[in-house]
Image (tube, coloured by chain):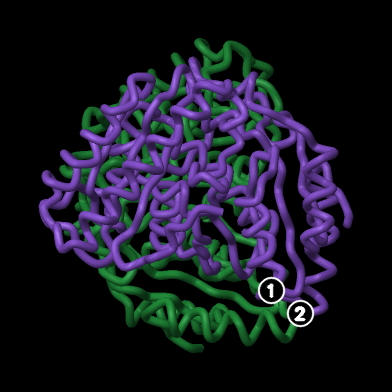
Chain colours: A green, B purple
Amino acid sequence: MKVAVNEQQLRAEIKKWKEEGLTIGLCPTMGFLHEGHASLMEASAASCDRTVASVFVNPTQFGPNEDLESYPRDFEADCRLLESKGVDLVFHPEPSDMYEDDFCTYVDVDVLSKTLCGESRPIHFRGVCTVITKFLNLVKPDRIFFGKKDAQQLAVVRRMVRDLNFDVEVVGCPIVREPDGLAKSSRNTYLNDKERQAALILYKSICLGIELVEAGERNSEVLKAGMLDKLAEEPMADVEYVEVVDGSSMQPVETFKEGDLVAMAVRIGTTRLIDNFTAGENDIKAG
Amino acid sequence: MKVAVNEQQLRAEIKKWKEEGLTIGLCPTMGFLHEGHASLMEASAASCDRTVASVFVNPTQFGPNEDLESYPRDFEADCRLLESKGVDLVFHPEPSDMYEDDFCTYVDVDVLSKTLCGESRPIHFRGVCTVITKFLNLVKPDRIFFGKKDAQQLAVVRRMVRDLNFDVEVVGCPIVREPDGLAKSSRNTYLNDKERQAALILYKSICLGIELVEAGERNSEVLKAGMLDKLAEEPMADVEYVEVVDGSSMQPVETFKEGDLVAMAVRIGTTRLIDNFTAGENDIKAG
């Protein structure tokens, strides 16, 4: 496995592979990798000749009061995992390699970026789209892989790729969960023991939502009310939102139907966690 | 010469050329082509194996009170010129092929887009960058060609390409002028005889600016004052701006130096015309 720390090194490898006619999969990550990330690498290795993973804590997707500085990092452990998953090339640039001092170009997906997580994180998806555009232009992958845990991110990137005619297939991979059901996230490391226990309430609320849907409930307000009641059982849970939205536009829907998404953001202490489920997908499963 | 009217037709041609290892030049235009455009095609044909020209009046770069509807169009005449210049493929999509009803993704170069023409045309460069991003992703050219008449557009696109890591060389081509010095522009067709005569004042002011620089003047305020005085000689000229700016950042400079730009926008009647010259380039010449 090779490591490229700047554009030049990265482009040299990509050029070689392109000349050989090899297909390339790209798995963008912020590092501190877990089994959720690993599933992206596996999906890429299974469907592409070469897999590139980026490990880059992207500053432009963090707001001024967010956890850019404290975001967990462990590049050596990441490399061990990436190598074991058959990744061929890791792109691990410095922020200064990605953003020159007078950097001033941004890619913004309107509408989809303004709801849900976008309400409390107004520049987040602009930063995501900007860095993903950069990665797409650097790596020129045939497929790019994202976890469905970040459902809004997946929808925003899909829309960006469609609107801007990027020649890449966007692949969403199922949420990977801890044995007790908590969705895997690098930010889970912020939780102390008590918070880790309390964080289970997201999974319980998601499970209740799925049960309601399986029992035939389709009214968004009823679904939301049930899930909010469940979340309210945990005193440490501070709910940011529970919403039922169209899976493509991220706009609220009154009636839950195929392709729609039920998404939530909840703070446990100072840690912001997200989770979701999609209509028609039975991929909810504790690890 | 082939004409592609949608993404599918375009991609099919591009794919073939890429597989053959041919280099591709792209000349984006809004049609109603003149010798200025022709010089882009010539530059592309001279340096690339294949040349693609787009003919597309891009709605997202026009403000609500601008001339989108009245912008001159003559696709048949354009095709004759393009064929004579060795263009291999014309991309001529409908607006609905480029922008779906729920299109909502934009590429914005901040700072550079806000000055000069950006002051009176606040969404113009966002529209330019968005459509150029789409073209770059569709055509995947090795080189993209722009006229230096639209100096700010050239600077904005250069910055976008750098910031977003597009793998393309941006080539600026010299301004082409009418025999009497007026910079070629599709919008010159809006001018009636009297206005056409009055429009010469832009060229005269540009020539005065160059003379002042050649005589050693470097003070931006003195340059501007001289050029504004010249423009004031024409009662039909309504000056929007004359500015001396850094050629890369488009920010005002006090002292004119290598690479800086003197740019102007002037209305003659209802027609908005632009012109400019760059320090260190002696390409000012009437046709």
Looking at the image, can residue A169 be seen?
no
Residue at the image position 49 percent from the left and 42 percent from the top: B182
B38 left or right, relative to A123: right
Inspect the image, locate mark 1, and give the three-letter code of the amino acid beneath it: Ala
Compared to residue A223, the image places residue B221 above or below, namely below
CA neighbours of label 2 inside 10 A, class few (<14), some (14 to 19), many (20+):
few
Q: Chain of mark 2?
A: B
Asked if residue B150 can be seen in this view, the reply is: yes
Residue drawn at x 59%, y 24% is B190
* Secondary structure of the residue carrying numbered label 1: helix
A113 shown above or below A22: above
Q: Nearer the viewer, residue A42 or A214?
A: A42
**Which residue extends farthest right?**
B2
| Residue B118 position within the rendered picture, expressed as x and y whole percent measured from the top left | 35, 34
Instruction: Please give the label number shown on residue B46.
Output: 1
User: Mark 1 vs mark 2: same chain?
Assistant: yes
Q: Position of residue A123 (x, y in %)?
A: 32, 39
Q: Report how far apart the C-alphas of labels 1 and 2 lie in the structure.
A: 17 Å
The chain to which mark 1 is attached is: B
Identified at 64% across, 79% down, the residue is A50
Residue type at the position of mark 2? Gly
Q: Which residue is mark 2?
A: B21
B107 sits to left or right of A88: left
Q: Earlier in the sequence, mark 1 or mark 2?
A: 2
Q: Are marks 1 and 2 in contact (CB under 8 Å)?
A: no
Above or below, B68 against A139 in this view is: above
